[in-house]
Image (tube, rainbow, N blue to C red):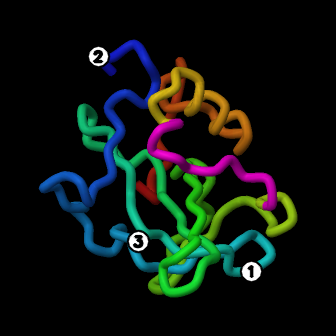
Amino acid sequence: MSETRPGANLVPVTETDRTIADPDLDVRGRDVVTSDGEKVGSVDDILIDDEELRVRFLRVSSGGFLGIGKDHFLVPVDVITGIEPERVRVDRDRARLSDVPAYDPELVREGDYYQNLYGWWGAPPYWGAGYTYPYPYY
């Protein structure tokens, strides 16, 4: 990354003219299910590193009614345990997700937001030494 602040180059794919190269990996609209099989929301956007052209996070919407009152949270691609035709599996159970950090476009500008987010998920940050991209998922 050319920026010194982690996450400085992350943008929602819907705010770009880019597409996901492999349509099978464009998981927008798919349900997100936990390790115990419970639905916790659906993928409404994908955050890409606009410099390295890699997917870094799924933005998940949950709750609400007819789009009103929905909450959003980010899932690092590193904690995806499976991508299926209609859903994405993540490495957490529903009880643990009760305190997932909320996604707020204003918060992502804070210097330690992504560091704290990776810490919460227990995953190594993509800017860290020795990081390995989570193939085959992305």
Q: Position of residue 138 (x, y in %)?
A: 40, 54
Quadrant showing the N terminus: top left
Q: What residue did someone put label 3 on?
A: 27
Q: Point out the tag, 1 or 2, that comes first from the N-terminus.
A: 2
Span of residues in magenta: 98-107
Of residues 10 and 136, the one nearer the viewer is 10
Q: Residues within 10 Å of mark 1 (few under 14, many from 20)?
A: few
Residue at 35% in and 38% down: 10
Residue 2 disc label: 2
Q: Point out the tag, 3 or 1, that comes first from the N-terminus.
A: 3
* Whole-number angstrom distance, CA of label 3 to CA of label 1: 17 Å
Q: What residue did someone put label 1 on?
A: 38
Of residues 133 and 72, the one nearer the viewer is 72
| Residue extending farthest right | 95
As helix, strand or loop, the secondary structure at mark 3 comes to loop
- Residue 28, placed above or below residue 99: below
Q: Amino acid at mark 1?
A: Glu
The kind of secondary structure the magenta stretch mainly shows is loop
Q: Is residue 8 left or right of residue 94?
A: left
Q: Amino acid at mark 3?
A: Val
Residue 118 disc label: none
* Whole-number angstrom distance, CA of label 3 to CA of label 2: 28 Å
Q: Residues within 10 Å of mark 2 (few under 14, many from 20)?
A: few
Residue at 23% in and 54% down: 15
Decide whether residue 15 is among the magenta residues.
Answer: no
* Whole-number angstrom distance, CA of label 1 to CA of label 2: 39 Å
Q: Point out the tag, 3 or 2, that comes first from the N-terminus.
A: 2
